[in-house]
Image (cartoon, rainbow, N blue to C red):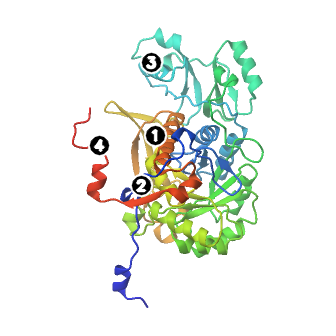
Amino acid sequence: MVSFRDKLVHAPVAYTFRDVIIVPGFAEVEPSEVDLSTKVTKSFSIKVPIVSSPMDTVTEERMAITLARLGSLGVLHRNCSKERAIEMARNVKEASEVIDSVPTLSPNDSVARALELMREYDIDVLPVVDGDGRLLGTVIKVDVLLSLSEEPVASIVRRDIPILDTAADVSYAASLMRESKLTALPVVTKDGRYLGFIRAEMLSTREKGVEPSRGRDGRLLCAAAISPFDIDRARALDRYVDILVIDVAHFHNRNCINATKRLVKEVSADVVIGNIGTYKAAEDVVTGIERVDGLRVGISSGSICSTGEVTGAAAPTLFAVAEVADALKDYGLEIPVIADGGIRSAADAAKAFAVGAWCVMCGYLFAGCDESPSPVVRIGGKLYKYYRGMGSHAARVQRYILDRYSPVAKHVAEGIEALVPYRGPVSKVLREFVAALKAALGYAGAKSIRDMWEKARIAVITEQGAGEIRPHSVEPL
């Protein structure tokens, strides 16, 4: 038996994103030439290597549809009934590739707020939705301009504008626009939940360089989170989704492994397993489960996760990715590794790629976007959105997510609730993230994510050094 002292003396260093930097390397291509395409599972590729987390304040159908349209992927959360999970998946699969995200108004928002959004997003019509996300109607610019600024939009909402459902094709949308003489029409699900707008300009031209993520059926790529212990739900979702994501806080568990061994034989969708955080966990998973199509890696790095603080157990994402990637390399396996947790910027994503990740999963990054399920709130003149960890008390009250955590921890909250700054449309967030990520790879001397594995060099940085590489010694304007 190893001595307790040796446990301390020979303990590995679990580096985090804050501990390291990317050492600049010889660049052979310009940032604009960097290729960010990657695989999210063995079968499915995405052009933008960023996936949204399956959290109930991050990813429902609106987020999933928008991300798939933009060449990325959203994983639908599971903190809901089986029927609601199926409804979300079906809505993604039935959605048009040309649905654009437009910010929403609540009936109590002011006319001044409506005008502010119209000018910011260069649009003449905005949707008004209730607290459940169902479309109540629209407001148009002429009504906004001719109304008092403090008046609520409920007084000018129009309910007679044509509405498209998710199954509407491009030609029908175009003909309806011509008939109604409108340049934008709202799209809703079968039960009236607002998804986005189809704009006239989008029907004739797609966003330059954007190729949607598609499944085997040619429709938008769809992924949904599941419990390894709910085979009935997995079978039901398997009819609609391309990817099933096992959603467990600590998957390296005999019961989880045995349950997943049975589950993978019952479904045809690709199965992503996680979360894991060590070499041994990866080894046990790939040797113990017949089919592993992807791995979700990282434990307790998320901004609203308190597992590390509550239990003392953690596998920070950077450390975890390196451990798992090495295990796969030693076994000669090419299984996509999704770095999950603690990724606050493109810089963090680039560091994850440097140690073996194929793509990254983010919750915080997307929680403040228009497409997340939470409403926008104004506090002290600033806009925020609500965000909560799936181990928080509020999330666990719904009870659908309880088995994400071990039975021992069921009476202990392992997440918090918070407000995050409002960020606007996810398309804007992705554009900025992609631009910064391409620059980061360029600095590393890499022309692709796979190239990053070979060429990127990492250096450990001191706390003083971390302060020095940020803006300092000045008064910011």
Spatial CA span between label 1 and label 2? 31 Å
Identify which amino acid the numbered label 4 is placed on.
Answer: Pro
Which circle, 4 or 1, is nearer the viewer?
Answer: 4
Identify which amino acid the numbered label 2 is placed on.
Answer: Val
| Image marks 1 and 2: residues in contact by CB distance under 8 Å | no
Residue 399 seen in this snapshot: no
Tell me the residue that label 3 is attached to.
Answer: 111
Spatial CA span between label 3 and label 4? 39 Å
Q: Secondary structure at mark 1?
A: loop
Nearest to N terminus: mark 4 or mark 1: 1
Tell me the residue that label 2 is attached to.
Answer: 23
The mark tally for this picture is: 4
Q: Secondary structure at mark 3?
A: helix
Determine whether, in the image, residue 316 is placed left or right of residue 373.
left
Nearest to N terminus: mark 3 or mark 1: 3
Identify which amino acid the numbered label 3 is placed on.
Answer: Val
Tell me the residue that label 1 is attached to.
Answer: 368
- Residue 471 appears in which quarter of the rendering? top left
| Image marks 4 and 2: residues in contact by CB distance under 8 Å | no
Tell me the residue that label 4 is attached to.
Answer: 471
Residues packed near mark 2 inside 10 Å, few (<14), some (14 to 19) or many (20 plus): few
Nearest to N terminus: mark 2 or mark 3: 2
Q: Position of residue 14 (x, y in %)?
A: 41, 67
